Every structure is written in C-alpha cells, then in structure tokens.
Amino acid sequence: MALIEVNALTKVYSSDELQTPVLHGVSFTIAAGEFVAIMGPSGSGKSTLLHILGFLDRQTAGTYRFDGREIGEHTDRELARVRNEQMGFVFQSFNLLPRTSVMDNVRLPLLYSSVPPAEWDERARIAIDAVGLSHRAGFDVAKLSGGERQRVAIARALVNKPRVIFADEPTGNLDSQSGKAVMEILQKLNEHDNHTVVLITHETYTAEHAGRIIRVRDGLIESDQAVAKRLHASSDFVK
C-alpha cells in the first residue's frame, strides 16, 4: 500500500517579480514499511521535497497524497495534527531543548497530541529504550555526546508512533562512528519495527542503509533504484 504518492510535483518560490523554480514535475510513490533515501547535491531540491512531504510547505502544482488523502484536502490545523501524530522528524542539528532532560525532550510531542497524559511517561520510556538510552533518561541533553543527542531526537520522533520518520541529513554533525550508529538505529527501526523511513542525504554510504535510493538533481528525479547490496546493521546494536 502506498503511504506517499507524489505526482508531477512542482515548486516555484516567488519573491517580488522573481520566480525560482526548484522542483520540476517530480513523481514517485513510497510504500508503508519502506526505507527510502532521497539523495542529491546541495541545491538539487531534496530539502524542498522533504518540506512538502512533511507538510512543512505546499507544492505549487501537482499532487501529493499521504495515506490516500491529498494534501490540499487538509486545513492548516489538520496538517499540523497529522504532522504531529503521524510523522516524526530527525534533523541534522538535533533541535533539542537545551538544559532539559532526555525524558522531557522525548515527551515534548505528546503535549500536542491526543495521547492521555497518564501514558506520556510510559510512551517516552519505550521510545528512549528503543534507541538504547534508558540509562540517560534523566540526564540533561547538554551533557550528552553528539551521537547520543541524535538518538534522543530519534526517540522524540518515535514517541507518537508515527507512520513515517523523516530524517534530514541525520549524520551531518556527527563523526563517522556516531553516524554509523545512528544509521543502524534507523535501519533497525525499519527492519524490525516496520517503520517507514525517508532519509534525505548527500552521502552515498549513508544512503546505502536504505533499501531504495531516489537521486535528485536540478529539481528532477535522475534515478530511482533498489539498493543492490544494502549495508548490514551490526548485530551488536544496543537495544
């Protein structure tokens, strides 16, 4: 079943009399349970595409259906609800609350959800455990390493049990070892928990953790192929 359906998607940014086309009729589908990397150089349009897929922006033309419903059928309030309850986001810069505990950071999306407050702590504990940080739950995030902070961000993305996780250059601020650990977590969440993952990256090694790579260049899809030999997630991954 297609979770994401994009057809002839176009995006043009307008400023005064200047128009800047970014996406030029992009089309693809992503099935529930897939791990897809959208790959391309800076300026290729991949970040704009992510913003549209994540309901952070709207296309200029074409259609985008999420879970069978076209984005234009949603009010802004409905878009915000779907984004919070069915989508999880992981960003390069972590976007965590400073001077706040791991638990409180992970609980944050629940404040704006329909989940009863009595369930918040348990939901957060399950998400923190999923990324192997139960021993850090009470720590201030400022005391964590970069890799641990990104794992907190992944736990926060998981806490509402989303349909899809959007990861935007999640290893960009990490050393190679921490980046590998983060990618293995995303791969495990896809393979073992059946989470749909959409990864935005410019790195081939990172993209090869996915099962499929969509390459974007100059606002067009250059190729869309299954990964010939998907990287193997380490068996010693933390629980």
Image: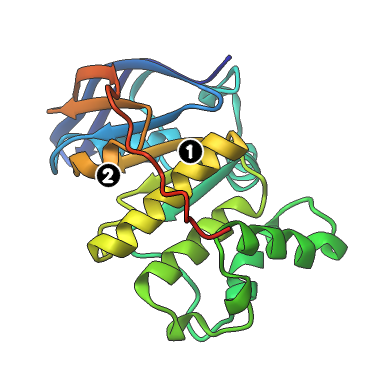
The disc at residue 55 is 1
Task: Tell me if residue 232 can be seen.
Answer: yes
- Residue ID at (35%, 48%): 168
The answer to which of 92 and 47 lies nearer the viewer is 92
Tell whether 52 sits left or right of 153: left
From the top left corner, tell me how far across and down residue 114 is, in percent: 78, 50
Disc number placed over residue 65 in the picture, else none = none
Secondary structure beneath disc 2?
helix
Amino acid type at circle 2 is Thr
Identify the residue at horizontal 45%, vertical 42% (top origin): 187
Q: Secondary structure at mark 1?
A: loop
- Image point (64%, 38%), residue name: 78
Q: Is residue 223 left or right of residue 168?
A: left
Q: Quadrant of the N terminus?
A: top right
Q: Position of residue 218 (x, y in %)?
A: 12, 28
Q: Earlier in the sequence, mark 2 or mark 1?
A: 1
Q: Nearer the viewer, mark 2 or mark 1?
A: 2
16 shown above or below 116: above
- Asked whether 191 or 32 is in front, the reply is 191
Q: Is residue 64 visible?
A: no
Height in image: 47 above or below 92? above
Q: CA distance from mark 2 to mark 1?
A: 24 Å
User: Vertically, is 67 above or below 200?
Assistant: above
Examine the rendered structure and indicate whether residue 68 appears above or below residue 33: above
For the point 31% across and 58% down, the residue is 179
Task: Read off the residue under disc 2.
Answer: 206
